[in-house]
Amino acid sequence: MVNCCGLVSEKNQPVPLKSVSVELQVKDHVVSVSSSLQYVNEEERPLEAVFVFPLPADAAVCHFSAKIGEQEIVAELQDKESARDQYDDAVSSGQQAFLLEESNESSDVFKLSVGCLSPGENAVISIVYVMELSVQADHALRFCLPAVLNPRYTPAASAAGVPEVFSACVIPYTLSLSVEVRSSDRISRLESSCPLDPLVFLDAQHTHATVNLSAGHRFDKDVELLLYYENTHQPTAVVEAGAGAAQPGSLMGDPVLMISLYPEFPVDVMSSLASRGEFIFVVDRSGSMDCMMHHGKDAQMRIQSARDTLLLLLKSLPMGCYFNIYGFGSRFESFFPQSVVYSEDTMEEALNRVKNMKADMGGTEILQPLKHIYSQPCYPDHPRQLFIFTDGEVGNTKEVLDLVKSHVNSHRCFSFGIGEGASTALITGMAREGSGHAQFITGTDRIQPKVMQSLRFALQPAVDSISVDWSVPEGVMVDMLSPPINTLFQGQRALIYAQLKGQSSGTAEGAVTLKYKLKDQPVTNQLQFALKPTEDTGRMIHQLAARSVIRSLELEMRAGRAEAEAVRSRIVELSVQTGVSSVHTAFIGVNKDGKRTITGPLLQSRVPVRRMARRSVGGGGGSGGTRMCRMARMSVGGGGGSGGMRMHGREVSMAHCALRKSAAPKMFCSVERSIRTPPKDCRMMVECDSVSHLAEPEPQTDPLLQLVSLQKASGCWELNASLAAVFGKTESEVTKHRPAQVDGSMWATVLALIWLYACRSDDQVEWQFVAMKAVSWIRSQKPEGLSQCVRDGNILLGGHVTENMLGI
């Protein structure tokens, strides 16, 4: 029986991916990832496999090879159309061939086609990519190896689409992973969401270490690694030597410099938060938000977690700012026609609507609500701050990013990817193009701390007026390869790439001076670097610099700022020259030395990627019908040029899958006119973009959220039975302990603060703004007997909180 509607072989055997092996080489803030995937054709006929899989959005794919038996085929980068034609011709003639290409619509989706594997034959596919490591709130460098790829929702009106994947419930392959870290900074520790062997240091300075993933790991969830250095905020400049065989003056032939800028801001500056702004919260309400946050105990629905987060956000906003809330799916709606002033009345109206928010708006179309938001005029002296929550399943990612980029001067964008499978291209791209910050919530992560951290970013001053000045000897020129940095927030790091051209007969060192302003205060950092590195340290920095240039050119091409064909030619030229993939190139490898030609009809197979199967019913773009699943490539008839027919079109449908709404949902799959239903153990995993099939459990009421929900917009609490219940008391118990010199609201507000510090200190990042508003309100009242109030509150609640701790 088919596992969760997975399109497998005609005998319904598991797809022949047997194992995945990954090696990581970390160098300071960047990493090289080498992945090996082992296939075996267990069929009795020749096999063509299609494997669609996710890579991080900013990864630069720089190597692709295949080993069949003892024969190794190293692929070459070529113009994508030429590579496709060469692959089709090779497979049609019975030759073994491999094609790796990036999706036209999303830079974090790649498709690998494995052509003509003979019965019983093994193939090991090797892919190498390099990428920057993102920085987390606790200064860790994060690497994530994604195990899922959700189908990207594509509006019916759009002709483009990202290939979809159907997965088995049980992953038939394992993962092995090894990590080597080399750094100019001392390594503190390395943590993971999966079991690791002990970290082994290879030098006395603790700058070189290795670690392995514990044996037997089933690749059924994302593998997250967190790397901690001792001096994370220290600016660094690293020079990588050019390739000796490359032409001097070319990007690969010259040295390339990488500068790391990760400012540490003074505490006094960061404690002064802005009280102005227009805060717009955009929440995904497609059917996929009815999925669980994770598969562990007490997991919330994603939509419930979003509701709780909006409660915290609404209670944390400063009085007098502007706000609005949008929900989107196949359509969108806003709570108010335009952003309104934050007050007690508007906050309560919004909270009442938040309580009734459901994942009931169909597919995921984020482009139209963004266009509507950007069409609204901004409020003077209230900078627009956009907070976007989604599980990231769209097929028009690049169109969305271009829109955000075009409005970068009028807003900042903070984006949140909810659940495993959120598109890194969409989430990180919106934050990057909107000069904001991206966060991912996976596994058992709580969304609220990460959202409140981003709210602090939105309320804090950002680094601006960033400039880079170079001091190099005569004969040497510096060519900046990175786009200019406009803003930088606390907790954000920027990597800047530059090419060093020319020769110097004298000074062997150069210097770079980084200048920026923080709340109108100038800051300067100067770094020294060697013009000629003493050793060959690889090509990782060159490849990432090339990726930066290629991405800038792709954006320029889509924006129509230059003649498209000329820019495309430049992209292809740079991609082939540097060996770094682009949307206009593909890796192609053909085994031309094979002694035999494969004949007979080809069987196509799809490699599964673990996810919950999901569909769109009554989908987007007003189609009103079922969105069909498009399968790539079908082979019919003979090989070896014997007159058999082969269909080359990549959008030929091999299967049509639709989810029909019913009391007991069934999956209808037409695969060559056969209809099957999923096994019972998978049935409850099926979930739809517009119809939920899992009954939402009664939400577990968190006392912290109960307390927050009772706070007034001004920052105070009222003395009532609901507040007393949070403290585990009756209203009469709380009332009789009230000091005579303070009123009920003052007493209630002091008690709320004491409870937060005494009982929920570990969650301070979530309630920090709620507490700040309360303290401001208390100060504005200029109460008498405050010290006595705090003492009596501690006695009532059993706390030991001082006035200094409370900030009053």
Image (cartoon, rainbow, N blue to C red):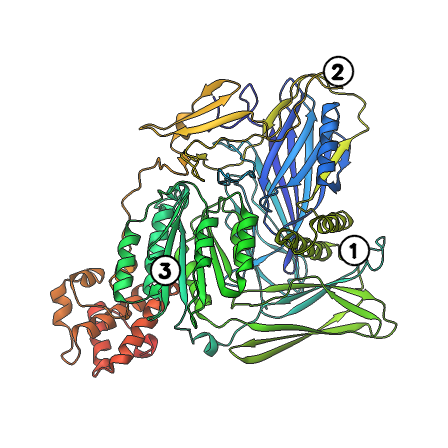
Q: Which residue is the site of mark 1?
A: 252
Residue 641 or residue 368, whichever sits in front: 368
Cα–Cα gap, marks 2 and 3: 66 Å
Q: Pinpoint residue 608: horizontal percent, then vertical percent.
A: 54, 33
Q: Is residue 130 left or right of residue 720?
A: right
Name the residue rendered at 72%, 24% in the picture.
Answer: 92
Q: Is residue 26 above or below residue 488?
A: above
Residue drawn at x 13%, y 66% is 733
Earlier in the chain: of badge 2 and badge 3, it is: 3
Mark 3 Cα-neighbour bin, 10 Å: few <14, some 14–19, many ≥20: some
Q: In the rendered structure, which amino acid carries the disc numbered 1?
A: Met
Residue 610 visible in the displayed image = yes
Residue 808 quadrant = bottom left
The amino acid pointed to by label 3 is Gln
Question: Could you tell whether 757 is left or right of 283 in the image?
Answer: left
Depth-wise, is mark 1 or mark 2 nearer the camera? 2
Discs 2/3, front: 3
Q: Earlier in the sequence, mark 1 or mark 3?
A: 1
- The 10 Å Cα crowd at callout 1, few under 14, some 14 to 19, many 20 or more, is many
Type of amino acid at the residue the image marks with label 2:
Ser
Residue sitting at x 31%, y 76%: 776
SS at mark 2? loop
Residue under pointer 3: 338
The picture places residue 72, in percent across and down from the top left corner, at: 77, 34
Q: Nearer the viewer, residue 455 or 217?
A: 455
**Which numbered marker is on residue 642?**
2
Q: Is residue 197 left or right of residue 557?
A: left
Residue 126 quadrant: top right
Looking at the rendered structure, the secondary structure element under dot 3 is loop
| Residue drawn 28% across the image and 75% down it | 777
Foreground: 762 or 652?
Answer: 652
Percent x, y for residue 206?
64, 62
